[in-house]
Amino acid sequence: MKLATLDFFIFIVYAIGLLCIALWISRNDKKEGTNTEDYFLASKALPWWAIGASLIASNISAEQIIGMSGSGFALGMGIASYELMAALTLVLVGKYLLPVFLKNNIYTMPQYLEQRFDTRVKTVMATFWLAVYIFVNLTSVLWLGGLAFESVAGVDAMFGMIFLAIFSIAYSLYGGLKAVAYTDILQVVLLVFGGLLLSYLALDAVSDGQGFIAGFGVLTEKLPGHFDMILSEENSQYINLPGISVLVGGLWVTNLAYWGFNQYIIQRALAASNIKEAQKGIVFAAYLKLLMPIIVVVPGIAAVILYPEIEKNDLAYPALMDLMPVGIKGLIFAALVAAIVSSLASMTNSISTIFTMDIYSKAVKNKSQRHYVHIGRITSLVALSIGLLTAEPLLGKFDQAFQYIQEFTGLFTPGIVVIFITGMFWKRTTANAALAAGVGSAVFSVLIKVMAPEYPFMDRMGIVLLLCFGVTILMSLMSKSEQNNTCVNLSEVNFETSKGFNIASLGVVIILCIIYTVWW
């Protein structure tokens, strides 16, 4: 499949427009980039709508659009639990975690760990996050983005990855988080519009032109197994989505680690002017997450009927682009690229923030603010270069890249959740116990994986979480040393939320109850 001249023209107009907006945002404030707060936290002045849009734009990328559509093709609507339960997780993050982080006035997650525990915990976790962001997140987004270029635009995947890397750097390197966050508003509008349009056209094609409602009816009739939200043990995909665990088990581990303690996600909320603005942005993002199954999973299911001959699951979404008329195809392709470059820009900005603020600034002290910003920019370039070189070797052999990401990060996420939850809400937790939880997470995960390879990774995460909690509590109780905790005391943190936040949160719960009741 190739893009027509008009499609390329529309895509080029989008790219130039985005770069112009980013440049205007970056230059609009004369002080932009002169200090680390400006560059890494957008001067701590992001409004709620920019926070919510940027959260989703940073999250929804190639691994969601292409990868999750591929998983929708393979196993159906059940994969949407990652999106749906994320909405509920966001509400809890806004209610219980954000107030703690904002009260401590931090730049990064490792910085909080240093305040709460010690430099060892911060350094270990900062190094871990840098490795994951570069070798898992960046590589997956680049590789799947390259596949999209190859399938849709007819260009080599490596050329596509290089273009995406250069594009993301071009509009984010100078302005930092502020440029990323405000251009994300445009990205999200394009992403949602393009995604909904593709879903409509896919469902209309399934019903032979009878409309999207009829098309949805055809899917539920012909592919009833693809609409099981809670998979039974007899389902061939049970190992990926083990039944009730998506509601009360290991999926919570993934969601809490990602939405609560993931630097390139939570950094947007840390850049809010105040807690109320951050919470409004969080709940706005929760409602956008509820739309994602329609945008990324339903097209994958439709591809089962429209393109049953697809060799790789992750080619489902690119194949659906064939449904687009000339001109609109360029717009949808622009939406896909918008999601990819937004995530790349967010990841590289967070990589540079962690490296600069948690590692470099501690080793090379007493430098100017401008110097640290300069180091942050260099770090972004180096990280993307590494991602380009390692993307294909790491992900080229996987049919479902989204599942690969969950499997790999699942080795460590239980420990991360335990370190933060016990550190935030149990003052007795020690640094040694936190380190033991981090190391134990990987050890326990590998042992269970080796001893029971057929055991679902989501259930494995739940068991490892409990083991890590046990290790942390036991070691903390056995320790006689006093913990050097410089964090704000919880008694000084206000966990009360506004009436609007509470009503909006209740709406999220009601919608989730309806969805899981209808498609249990």
Image (cartoon, rainbow, N blue to C red):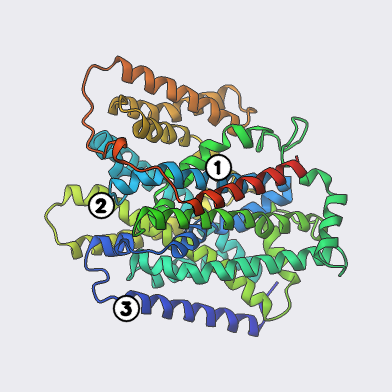
Looking at the image, residue 346 sits to the left or right of residue 435; the answer is right
Please give the residue where the numbered disc 2 appears in the rendered image.
Answer: 357
Q: What residue lies at 19% left-to-right and 65% top-to-bottom?
A: 370
Q: What residue lies at 56% left-to-right and 63% top-to-bottom?
A: 146
Given residues 464 and 377, the one toward you in this image is 464
Of the two numbered discs 1 and 3 on the same chain, state the one appearing first in sequence. 3
Residue 507 vertical placement versus 208 (above, below): above
Residue 307 seen in the current view: yes
Q: CA distance from mark 1 to mark 3?
A: 39 Å
Q: What residue lies at 77% left-to-right and 46% top-to-bottom?
A: 227
Q: Position of residue 11 (x, y in %)?
A: 57, 78
Of the two numbered discs 2 and 3 on the same chain, state the one appearing first in sequence. 3
Given residues 325 and 449, the one toward you in this image is 325
Please give the residue where the numbered disc 1 appears in the rendered image.
Answer: 406
Q: Secondary structure at mark 3?
A: helix
| Residue mark closest to the camera, 1 vs 2 | 2
Looking at the image, residue 434 sits to the left or right of residue 250; the answer is left
Residue 28, numbered label: 3
Q: CA distance from mark 1 to mark 2?
A: 28 Å
| Residue mark closest to the camera, 1 vs 3 | 3
- If the image is split into quadrants, where does the C terminus sit? top right
Residue 484 vertical placement versus 357 (above, below): above
Q: Position of residue 70 (x, y in %)?
A: 68, 53
Q: Secondary structure at mark 1?
A: helix
Residue 457 vertical placement versus 259 (above, below): above
